[in-house]
Amino acid sequence: MKEEKGKTNLKNGKKIKILVCTLVVFLIATIAIFGIYTKYQNRMINNVKSYSYGMDLKGERTIILTPSTETETKIKDAEGNEVTDAENLTDEELTQKGYTKEEVAVNSESALTKENYEKSKEIIEKRLKQLDVEQYTINVNEENGQITINIPEDNRTDDIINNLIPVGKFEIIDSETKEVLMTNNDIKEARVMYGQSSSVQNGTNVYLDIKFNKEGTQKFENVTNTYKTVEESNTTNTTNTTSDNTTTDNTTTENNTNETNTSTENTTNETEGSTSEDTTKEEETQKEIIMQIDGEQMMTTSFDEVVSTGEMSLVVGTAATDEETINDHAQNALNMATLLNNGEMPIEYEGVSQYILSDITKTQLHIVEIAIIVIIALALLRLIIKYKTNGFLASIGYIGLAAILALIIRYTNVVIAIEGIFAIAIVLIINYIFQSKLLSKQKKLKENNENETVRKAMKETFKDFFIKMIPICIMAITFCFIKWIPISSFGMIMFWGLLLIAVYNPIITLYLLKINNK
């Protein structure tokens, strides 16, 4: 009676464990396929990261940059030198001073050379890399300087384009004379930094930190010394006066303050005069600099003290506590750092862009997805028919692995190209072969009345299987370091898939099979 009751409890325990495992896997698979949605600002948003698709699947943006043909007005003196502080003068005032206006092309004929076309291309490519654009193509027409760029279409595309067109001319100038004090050539590095705000509780400040090179450090020290805030003290006289008909008696001077004592004449009553005192006043006089990129003012400031470290940190935006605002400030700082880090383009460009659809439509992708799901379902059904409960448990484990692989691809920022889809299919096939061999080995061991058949089958299958997988593992790791997206997509997915198979099966699949073999 007790033995039957024990068997019943054991059987019920197995069912509960199998049910719990099935529900957990079902939950993970649901999250991987549909995501997790929460309400945000009267709309539902998916909190699970989206997949990153390559240009061959999602489409691409083609940007065509051509040297600008625009002109700008220059004011020159009688000797032909450019005058920078006459923008606000009327035509009559310009004539009186002997100044003339000229329309000058923004790109001179001497600038439109093959060398400058190539240099512009190199600077744009550096900007793409700093903006973490992993997949792109860039070509230059050496005859007319036209640069053609292809990048994936996503929510960052417009922002990226805005960072490719500017010249990136950095200047620190005198706010009055417009004298250029520092340029791009003085910058060593610009980077984004974060700091805790002292004015906003739990707030975060985003900084654009600019480091100057050796020559720039000396220049910046001189600038901060010249444009340092100066305080001047002006103290007026303090005078004691009496009633009318007074004569000056004695005058003494001390510390730049005149004290004049006067007494009355022809009067019998001495009258104490009133005292008036002007307090010391402090006035600040400042020389200021303007910091600008491509003539657009970033800030106007003077300096409280001389800076000899060769480093300057600028606050971008205001202190914030919410992640979205902080990320916006950080993106703005990154945009400026991208322009400062990669030099000034020798040519000014203007550009147009167009979206090019992928040759592979969403319908075709859905057909491929459905086909893969159907093939997997039929394959797992075969395992269930052949190995009964063990086949069912292995199938549950298989679905769990596929779901986790999908989440790993999302959160490791793997770009999915067509080759990446083939890699996913290969990983799923390899895992199916592994589980088939595992179940077959475990069945044979059980027929031979071996002890701990599941653990022993896992050990033998694992050893035999992954020795054969070594060449594929080496290939996958090698492909990961190749910058061409189709190859790196294949390599990264293969790498994570093989690693997941090696870790997941000895833990999860082994546990599931042990439930039915106790």
Image (spheres, rainbow, N blue to C red):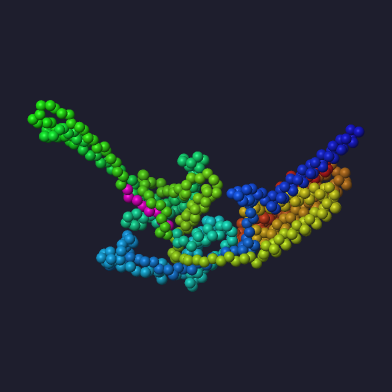
Q: Say whether residue 54 is visible.
A: yes
Q: What residue is drawn where x is 45% and y is 59%?
A: 168
Which secondary structure is most common in the magenta stretch? Answer: strand
Q: Is the N terminus in the top left, top right, bottom left or bottom right quadrant?
A: top right
Question: Percent position (x, y) of residue 464?
Answer: 77, 51
Q: What residue is drawn where x is 11% and y is 34%?
A: 245
Residue 369 highlighted magenta (yes or no): no
* Direction from residue 515 to residue 273 in the image, left or right: left
Q: What residue is drawn where x is 25% and y is 41%?
A: 234
Above-or-below relation of 146 to 424: below
* Direction from residue 369 to residue 262 in the image, left or right: left
Residue nearer the viewer, 213 or 516: 516
Question: Percent position (x, y) of residue 397?
Answer: 76, 48
Task: Give, as a single range, the part of the protein colored magenta.
Answer: 286-293
Question: Percent position (x, y) of residue 309?
Answer: 41, 46
* Direction from residue 182 to residue 35 in the image, left or right: right
Question: Percent position (x, y) of residue 376?
Answer: 77, 56
Residue reaching furthest top?
269
Residue nearer the viewer, 254 or 318: 318
Residue 291 highlighted magenta (yes or no): yes
- Which of the 4 quarters of the picture holds residue 293? bottom left
Q: Say whether residue 81 is visible.
A: no
